[in-house]
Every structure is written in structure tokens, then in C-alpha cells.
Image: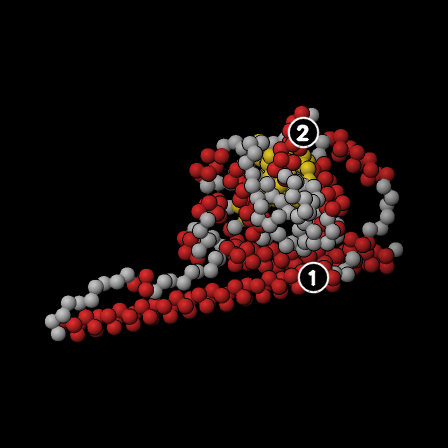
Amino acid sequence: MASRKEGSGAAGSGFGASKGKGKAAATGDSAVKQVQIDGLVVLKIIKHYQEEGQGNEVVQGVLLGLVVDDRLEITNCFPFPQHTEDDADFDEVQYQMEMMRSLRHVNIDHLHVGWYQSTYYGSFVTRALLDSQFSYQHAIEESVVLIYDPIKTAQGSLSLKAYRLTPKLMEVCKEKDFSPEALKKANIAYENMFEEVPIVIKNSYLINVMLWELEKKSAVADRHELLSLASSNHLGKSLQLLMDRVDEMSQDIVKYNTYLRNVSKQQQQKHQYQQRRQQENIQRQSRGEAPLPEEDINKLFKPPQPPPRMESLLIAGQINTYCQNIKEFNAQNEKNIVKQSHLGLCRTLI
């Protein structure tokens, strides 16, 4: 199961709502085309972050539901409890099993269909998330990870997205070969590592009626804070995180260029060695001596180990996510400017 510990992902408890796994794997298509979430689940995720999330602290939890055709219905969830490294006796897998068993006893959907995680300014494209989602998706084909952005949500727009690993990336993760050759052969780029699944939030008719009644009773106060143009803090933080990732990418590029130079240098050394060997054999043959025995050149010149490229892909994916967030944020600010100008014009006319 996904946990706060980096890279500690494991699923496969037998509680998954997995149907048609072989068919989806055989065709290479995604097993889930749409994610339907109950409004109560969304409120639970938001409440979990408000109670336990502080700043860049990540909160996580388990998603429960069922699969109907190619639609994943998420009907319930429960959080991972807060614990520290000193809680050596705490068993997360056992905790989740007991929670799902208790939900089953009270006739609540208990099938495991994924997990959720909060994010800090969109910083979620990490190796820990990749490993956790691979563990879930490998055990339960229909599993998704919900990414909740509390900062964007606080600005008046609910930010909740569902992601899955693409079939190509799943195959690469199964082989555990992240060398440049393997990724190139699989045609893996940062654009096709994750696939976003459309989300639909659904409420019962009674909840819709209640929301309508609450909207009627609520005070009609001017919510101009949602039209605020004071975006320097948010935009500055996003740009700072973007620059940090760009610096990491630059360092990774330097490492890869160093590897390429070492490979080129070794190829030249091999070529020079073979030429010297060939000239020496010609001289020995002219003296009537036996040629030197052939040697395994790969043993003499051990090829340098290529740097793993998965980290570079993750950094590139995170850079792309930051750019998309900044683009969306600026687009929202432009809309707010237009709305503010319209409000000002209306007040002038009144």
C-alpha cells in the first residue's frame, strides 16, 4: 500500500475490484475510461488534509468502490493515520485489512480500487508515487491515484485529478530496466508516463436537494476574494519550484553528457588497442611467430554504466506539470481581470 515512507508501495490484499484484467492487458487499452466519485468521498479527502496536512505535508488514504464496465466508481475512502518512524509496531497493511473488514461487516463498499494523495503546488510526479501506483496497478488493474491540490482548491476551484500508469510504462516497470536503451525501445517519454482519467462527481438526489436548500439559505455575500488578483505569492512559489526542477534537469543532463563522453573515449581506446594488436600480429607473422591469441575486449574495457533515465523522465514530467499549473493560474487571473472590469462597469452604470 502507498505510505508516507518513500517508495513503500504494495498492493494485492485480495480486496481489489479487479475484473477483466487479462483482456485489458491483452489489448493494451486502459481498463478504466472514467472515474465516478461520490461527493462524500471528496469531502472526506478535503477534511483529511484540513485536519492533518500542514504546508507541504502529504496526506494519503485508501479509495474503496467497485468497477462497472469501464467506469470506476469510488464510493468510500479512509485515511492513513499519522505516525512517525518511532512507531515501529504500526503495520499499515494490517491496518488497511482491518478497516476494509470492518466496512464489509457494516455492508459498506470495501473493495480496494486505489489511493489518494495531496500535493504541494503540484509536486507529485515522484519516484515514490510511481512505485506505489505500479504496486497498486500491478495487483489491481483498475487502480487509480487521486491527486488533490489544496492550494488551488482554496482559490475557489476544486483540483482533483485521477491518474494511472500507461501500459507502456507498466511493462517497463515490470522489467525493472530503466536504461536509456530500454526506455527508447519502449518509446517512453514524459508525456506518456501517466494518463489522466476523466472524473465525474456524483451525488444522490437527496444530497442535491440539500445543497439546493443550503444555497437558498446561505447569505448572499460578495465573494470578491475569489476574484482577487493578488497572485504574487502563488506564482512566485510555483516559479521557484519550476526553477529548482530545471536545475535538477541541468545536473542530470551534465551526468548523461559525461557518460556519453566516457563511452566515446572508451570506443577510441578500443579502436587503438585493436590497431596495435593487429600491427603486432603482422610483425610476428613476418618473423615466423604465432599470432597473439584473441582476447575478450569487453573484459579489458569494461563499458561504463549508463545513468538511469527514469529520474530524468520524472523531472521532465514534473516540469511539465508546473508549466501547466502556471498556465492555468494565469488564465484564471485573466478571467478575474475581465470579471473585475465588468463589475466596475456595472457599478459605474448603477
Eyeballing the image, is 133 above or below 182? above
Camera-nearest label, 2 or 1: 2
Q: What residue type is disc 1 on?
A: Lys
Q: Are marks 2 and 1 in contact (CB under 8 Å)?
A: no
Instruction: Look at the image and tell me whether residue 74 can be seen.
Output: no
Looking at the rendered structure, the number of numbered marks drawn on it comes to 2
| Mark 2, residue position | 103
Q: Nearer the viewer, residue 269 or 89?
A: 89
| Quadrant in which residue 35 is drawn | top right
Residue 319 visible? The answer is yes
Q: Which element is circle 2 on?
A: helix
Q: Point out residue 96 in the picture as x, y percentages from the top left corner.
A: 64, 36
> Vertical placement of 275 versus 337: above or below?
below
Q: Position of residue 288 (x, y in %)?
A: 11, 71
Mark 2, Cα crowd under 10 Å, few <14 / some 14-19 / many 20+, is some
Q: How is the image coloured?
A: secondary structure
Q: Which residue is mark 1?
A: 237
Residue at coordinates 17% horizontally, 67% vertically from top-left? 291
Q: CA distance from mark 2 to mark 1?
A: 41 Å
Type of residue at label 2? Leu
Name the residue at 73% across, 48% down: 53
Quadrant, the C terminus: bottom right
Q: Position of 21 compared to 49: left or right?
A: left
Of residues 126 and 194, the one nearer the viewer is 126
Q: Up-down: is 316 above or below 8? A: below
Q: Residue at x 44, y 57 (%)?
A: 180
